[in-house]
Amino acid sequence: MPSPNPHIAIVGTGVAGLMAGRRLRELLPNSRIAFYDAASQSGGRLKSIVIKDDVEGAEEIVELGGARFHPEHHPMVHALLEQLEIPTRDYQCALSPVHRAYFGYVLDVLRDILQRLQASFKEATPAEQSYLSFGDAAARFLGSDARDLIATAVGYDTLLHPNMSFASGMELLRQHPETSTLWGGHQGWLTPAKGFQSLTHALEAELRQTCTFHYGRSLRTFTSSAVCCQLGFDCPTGHSTEIADYVILAVAMRDLEHVSGARVPKVVSDAVIDVPLAKGYFTFDAPWWTDLGLKGQCFTTATAFRKIYFPAQGRSVQIYSDGPSARLLQELVAKSTREEIAREFSAALQDAVSIPMSTQRVLEAQSGWAFWERGVSFWKPGLRLMPPDCLAISDRHYFCSDLCTTSNGWVEGALVSADATARKIAEHARQRALQLDDQPSAETAGVRA
């Protein structure tokens, strides 16, 4: 039997969409694959900024999307980087909670609190682990003061979201480099040396040899029948219509709410919680924190600049905020002058590390920001209303997302879902080809008659 050669449309050129295309290239080498994306380039939620040193000519990478991975927790990420020959480097950023003068003591207190919470988690029933919110569980087992200290000290507002389950909150703390070591956990975190977006760039370069890419295409309408799918796009020239045998929707679930005919069932989308995420950076003329013994540390603050990272390499202080603090930071950046932002950041530095940083010096630093409306997504406690790894909305179209998986980390989950989606399509295409091959031609049927 000849290899099936279906036409496959993939909407979304983030890591999930590109990985699905790569796997389909392996599984169905004769297939025709076309990518569509509303953005102007690939990457999705991966966003790497290259900062060049005009004096020394060196390059520094600032991550405003995905930032790090662990080979043990994220085996597909690790394997894909090795296959694409993308070099990695060590990622080090020790948690230094609350304030430079107190962080050693607070770290000991936090470690004790988390170890007690871990013991309570192990003793909890499966129902309590799944249906209790992390905030309610921490308050029940440790008290409200200890609960609040956890969120403040680790810098994750999302932990206190009423729909963050006990199990999900514990997983978040165990699987992040700043907090995993509080249990004597994992070292060995890595990051791509040229930035996480080098992963999607490498995938696209490989796929462009046999696939087509169409940017600036926003999906607006979608219909599916037993034989094909029809997609309607808004594009720079107006509107375009495409026909495909199979469609992969590798986009955020909420993005499909405005696409006629492509919505995920409301009962499913309503069970997903989206939390905003904000990331930013200030690039100074020199890494002044090195002489102060701050390099490789992450300080948490009670400001819109929730977590401040002082990297071991480079000249860029990096910022992380999620949930309510991300909203505050987004509003600050949107409505304030550069001088006002610099003044607020100077105050945050004073609060975290007792360093009198002049507003003028912050003003002279290069800065940048990224705001992700759906930066953190998770299921309501006790609910996961999707089949494992990918959602086959029909035999012809599929929803591909890390939300379909139980993987640690959204990049790893995206790769797992992409692999599962590609395998489902390949299997259906082969079965369909076998059915067509088994059907007698009109001439043969006439002879038999």
Image (cartoon, rainbow, N blue to C red):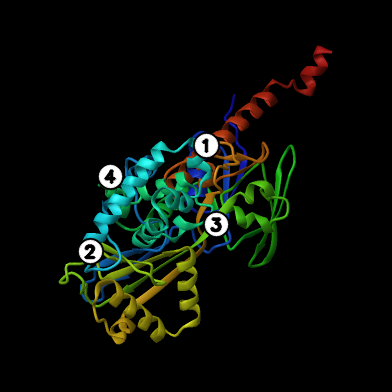
Left or right placement of residue 112 versus residue 35 in this view: left
- Mark 2 or 4: the one toward you: 4
Disc on res. 313: 2
Q: 26 or 247: which is nearer to us?
A: 247
Per the model, the C-alpha gap separating discs 3 and 1 is 24 Å
| Residue 183 makes an appearance in the image | yes
Instruction: Where is residue 187? Give x, y as percent.
Output: 25, 47
Identity of the amino acid at label 4? Gly
Residue hosting label 1:
420
Residue lying at 64% horizontally and 46% vertically, measured from the top left: 268
> Does the residue at mark 3 contact the one at mark 4 (Cβ under 8 Å)?
no
Residue lying at 79% horizontally and 23% vertically, measured from the top left: 442
Q: Secondary structure at mark 2?
A: loop
Residue hosting label 3:
274
> Does the residue at mark 1 contact the one at mark 2 (Cβ under 8 Å)?
no
- Mark 4 crowdedness (10 Å alpha carbons): few <14, some 14-19, many ≥20: few
Left or right placement of residue 358 versus residue 325 in this view: left
Disc on res. 185: 4
Q: 268 or 255: which is nearer to us?
A: 268
Per the model, the C-alpha gap separating discs 3 and 2 is 32 Å
